[in-house]
Amino acid sequence: MDGYTLADSLTPRAFSEMAGLDYEVAKALYGAYALEQDQYGQLLSGLDEYAVPLFDLLVFLKDSAEDYHLTLTLEDAGVSDTEDLFDQIESAQQQLKNDRHSRMVLYLNLPVESDETFAFLDTIREVAGQYYEGDYYVVGDSTSARDLAESFVTDNLLIGILSALFVIAVLLFTFRSAALPVLLIVVIQGSIWINFSIPTLTGQPLYFLGYLIVNAIQMGANIDYAIVISSHYQEQRALLEPRQAILKAVNAAFPTVFTSGGIMAAAGLLIGNLSTQPVIAIMGNCLGRGTIISIVLVLGVLPSILVLGDRIIERTSFQFKGVDWNLRSVKGTVRVRGHVRGYVSGFVDGNLDGILHGQLNATLSTDGQISPADEEGGDGNHA
């Protein structure tokens, strides 16, 4: 009211003008408050300059109404519901003070996370330590951010390594190659490092929780783009040379990668530019930017890596004995023995024992054989 807040200290004259009370009534209220607080000097020196916080005065008025037989008629001061007024005051007091602790709210003109902010938190603790001998706590978004950064540096490194190892383990059994999963992880992890180096180079703030969330999403979602291209490449590589195979693989995977990645990038950038919450906005921008970087690396860098590392991928490939199937590609006249599933001038899924004239691109059981047609009864080439 009239520009005053509950924390302001008012004299009897100011309080009477604000509340619409008679000045003598206001002085009587201040005198009762001084007696309650054992401030007898104020009574002797006069109450004209006696300033009392409005909050304390209203609480005293509420608590002492029955003892002093006061009738609370604040309607003239613009208060329609006196009981509601005191309920709000009591609620405010519970938020700021109880039997064990009192609360002080500070608003800092600093970023949520920065070296300057973290240094100022230490200053707050030093100043508080000069006045409070017992326990005191500094809480808030900045404190949480610093505690997380200090507590999870080691854990973050461990989580990053374990996440990469788990992804490699899954891809290891999917592609049956020890080198291919590592190459895919390198590409996606490289996009993550590039993504989070941009805020550092441009001086933009980066929230620690946002880093963890975007890191997990980018690793889990963008690895699919690399898997799509690698799967197509392996299929084409059984029939074509590496360069021809990668061209067909990229052409086949481009619509999927571009559509899925474009949607995720657009969604992240829209959230980053439309959200008014700084943490959400930075997370959205990082996610959108990271997805774009992943698409560029997957479509522009991964194909070259697959072609250059073709021999390494082939030499590190393995099969599961008695369980897995061996993909073979032959052309000409050969003798085939064993269970065949695939295309032999048409799709075949069955046990064969005969001479093939044509082209075969199919998986062959581990006990199957492919041998030249003139080696009747020979050992042949074991799959």
Image (tube, helix red, strand yellow):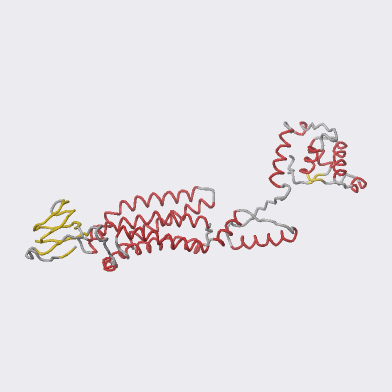
In x, y percent, where is residue 133?
74, 59
Residue 316: % across, % down: 29, 67
Closer to the camera in the image, 307 or 45: 307
Left or right relative to 64: residue 243: left
Q: Is residue 256 above or below residue 71?
A: below
Q: Quadrant of residue 329?
A: bottom left
Residue 65 to residue 103: above or below = above
Question: Seen in the image, is 159 located left or right of residue 342?
Answer: right
Left or right of residue 28, residue 306 in this image: left
In what quadrant of the picture does the C terminus appear?
bottom left
The mark total stands at: 0
| In this picture, residue 7 sits left or right of residue 51 | left
- The quarter of the picture where the N terminus appears is top right
The image position of residue 175, as x and y in percent, is 30, 59
User: Which residue is rendered at x = 32% and y = 63% of the image?
Assistant: 180
- What residue sits 40% from the left and 55% below the top? 220
